[in-house]
Image: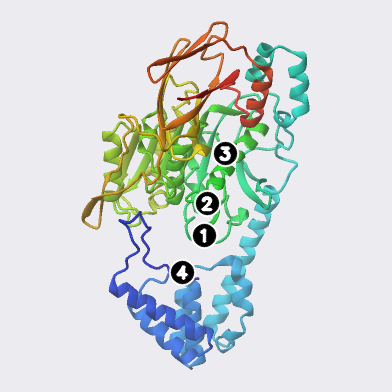
Amino acid sequence: MKFKRCLFFLFLSLFATNCVNAQEKLVNMYDSAQVYYKKKDFKKAAYFYDVYYIEQQKAESNYDTYYAAVAAAHVGNMDRAKYYLKRSAAIGYDLPSYNYFATDKDNAPLQALPEWKKFIGEFKHKADSAQTILNKTIAILNDTTIRSTTAVLDNIDYWKSFSKRNSAEQLTNKIKEFNSYSTTKKDNFWTVYHIKANDTLTIPFLVYIPQGYNPKEKTSLYVYLHGAVINRRNFANPAYIPDGLETAIMTKAVAQHAFIIYPLAKKDFGWLYQQQAFETVLKEITYVKSRYNINDDKIYIGGHSNGGSGAFWFALNQPSLFASFFGFNYLPKTYFGNTILKNLNNTRTFYGISGSEDTTFPLVTVNSIYQYGISNGANWKNFIRKGSHGLPFSSRDSINFIFDTLATRSRDPFPKKIVWETDNIKNGRYAWLEIKELDTLAAKAEWHQVLNPLVTQGGKTAEVNFNKNKSGAIIATTEGNTIKIESSRVRKIKLYLSTAMFNLNEKIKIIVNGKSYQNAKLVADKNVILEEFLKTKDRSFIVANTLELTVN
């Protein structure tokens, strides 16, 4: 394993990776030791490991100390080899890698030592025990007989047949009242499903089925985005998730008898830079809603570190499915595209917790963005708790109150006011209104102002450009059957009309930029109802018809 270098995430031009000279020296010692170890120049490797560990009192990996022990043994320094073996054991064993340690030919000089026999013996015992537990976990994760495998909501022929035989009103009522979900043979367990992200990539994701799940009752759902995405080369092994540190963060959600979706991400397919990864999370939610009785108005998304930043992206770009958002020890910015803080001015709250001693995303940095957002109307609450970047792991009691708060929040599917801005029409929709086409060559409306916060980092404060791309924006309000829309740099808009929001027996009056646009009488369209429902599986927001507008 590589030494965890002093890393600070890039934050536009203001933030750069900086390590102090002393730390760089340590890194050089460590890197030199590894280079010589790989060359099997154990004399030089032993020297650099010794120099490194004189300065570095806390070992990060039992691989490092194991290599140091091997190098010391090869040069005949058995006392030093024993010392490193003890340190390696004290760190803890990387149990899945037992065979590597046991069969490594380079450790031959160690094998006569009683300390080695004790080290490898304990390693094997713990690895065997862990494998037994892991095998049980894998068996449950992949057991298709205990989970829901059928989905009436995915049966297109069934719904087309029902639609053909019934009226639009009957189809709407059928969707609202639908609760014919299959039962599971057990509850309180994790299972793994797979979803196709694109033509070449199928991704596993985990789902927790709560204790006492009743397929006749609507159940809340949490989506948890894990951290450590920015440097993760591969998707995590699903078998290690159920008993992992990050799932422990969701203990309170488990106690609420809620469903949990645990998506998997990596550096080149994660919730920092890849639009398609975000869209895959939405696919996973729809997949689960097809098979389990999920309450459409009580879905929450959040995460830790990079996962919290991913949840912030959803709040600013794809909030329609969610009741609220949460982030622990997160950086409140999007890593690609604009960070449009104005989109937090809507009805769904982002709840955050920052550690007072977090050196990865320092409180002073997070707080400067937060205070700026609040001063501009953001629906955002950030709490401070004593702790470092690992706060949710080391002090779960300090974060659990967030889940109590979230559980009280329900989505309003039909907000009467929408403030929405986007620089990417893939993220143009919020609730019942969507920006379908931008007109970035047009002049901005006077009210369409960018929000660029003053951000403090390293004792310096400077304005950061959160809006590098040109965007379009809308402010839309409804009263009765009247829709008023103000637009800026927008060419086309799409309205998603519901009988829960508008009386389709009367004309809908649309006013755009102060001018009467049109009076339209629309009827509920069975084809639209079905098409939209099959895409979202949303039984709360049922689209009766749609209307596209071109803004002159």
Q: Which mark is residue 282?
A: 3
Does residue 238 sit above or below 30 in this rendering? above
Q: Are marks 4 and 2 in contact (CB under 8 Å)?
A: no
Q: Are marks 2 and 3 in contact (CB under 8 Å)?
A: no
Label 1 residue SS? loop
Instruction: Give the residue at x 77% y 25%.
Output: 158
Report, in whole angstroms, how far the alpha carbon at label 1 lies from the one at label 4: 22 Å
> Which of the two labelled residues, at mark 2 and mark 3, occupies the earlier sequence position?
2
> Which of the two labelled residues, at mark 4 and mark 3, occupies the earlier sequence position?
4
* Left or right side of 463 for 286: right
Bin the neighbour count of mark 4 within 10 Å (Cα to Cα): few under 14, some 14-19, many 20 and up. some
Instruction: Give the residue at x 29% y 74%.
Output: 22
Q: Are marks 1 and 4 in contact (CB under 8 Å)?
A: no
Q: What's the amino acid at mark 1?
A: Arg
Does residue 10 sit above or below 504 in this rendering? below
Q: Which residue is mark 1?
A: 232
Image quadrant assignment for residue 114? bottom right
Comparing 47 with 187, the one in front is 47
Report, in whole angstroms, how far the alpha carbon at label 2 lies from the one at label 3: 13 Å
- Furthest-top residue in this view: 506
For the C terminus, the image quarter is: top left
Label 2 residue SS? loop
Give the percent coordinates (x, y) of residue 316: 43, 38
Label 4 residue SS? helix
Q: What's the amino acid at mark 2?
A: Gly
Q: Which mark is residue 270?
A: 2
Q: Which residue is mark 4?
A: 91
